[in-house]
Amino acid sequence: MQTIEIAKLKIPNRYTPAEYFETLKASIAEKGVINPILISVTGRVIDGVARVRAAKALGHTEIPADKF
């Protein structure tokens, strides 16, 4: 696992229900990002798009990630 800058990620457009997004933001604000996102070697987010967006909305500049 590594920490990667959110600005360097390629984030695909995926719909996240607003209620889930707000719940996720509250969880990340309280506990931080517990599960790392999964990214490709090119930096595209494979799993964890909502976590990236929620962390970014909270002002985080980095997020834990595993490369696939």
Image: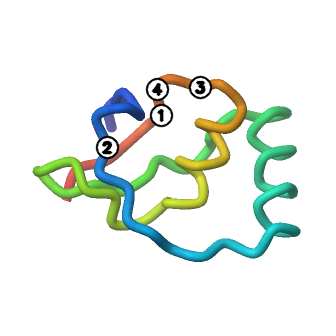
Disc 4 marks a residue whose amino acid type is Glu
Residue appearing at x 28%, y 34% in the figure: 8
What residue sits right under mark 4 in the picture? 62
Q: CA distance from mark 4 to mark 3?
A: 6 Å
Q: CA distance from mark 3 to mark 2?
A: 13 Å
Query: What count of labels does the image hold?
Result: 4
Secondary structure state at the residue bearing disc 4: strand
From the viewer's perspective, is the residue at label 2 or at label 1 nearer?
Answer: 2
Residue appearing at x 25%, y 56% in the figure: 44
Contact between marks 1 and 4 (CB within 8 A): the answer is yes
Secondary structure state at the residue bearing disc 3: loop
Secondary structure state at the residue bearing disc 1: strand
Q: CA distance from mark 1 to mark 4?
A: 4 Å
Residue 29's place in the image compared with 37, above or below, is above
Q: CA distance from mark 2 to mark 1?
A: 10 Å
From the viewer's perspective, is the residue at label 3 or at label 1 nearer?
Answer: 3
What residue sits right under mark 2 in the picture? 9
Residue 1 picture location, percent across and down: 33, 38
What residue sits right under mark 3 in the picture? 60
Q: CA distance from mark 3 to mark 1?
A: 7 Å
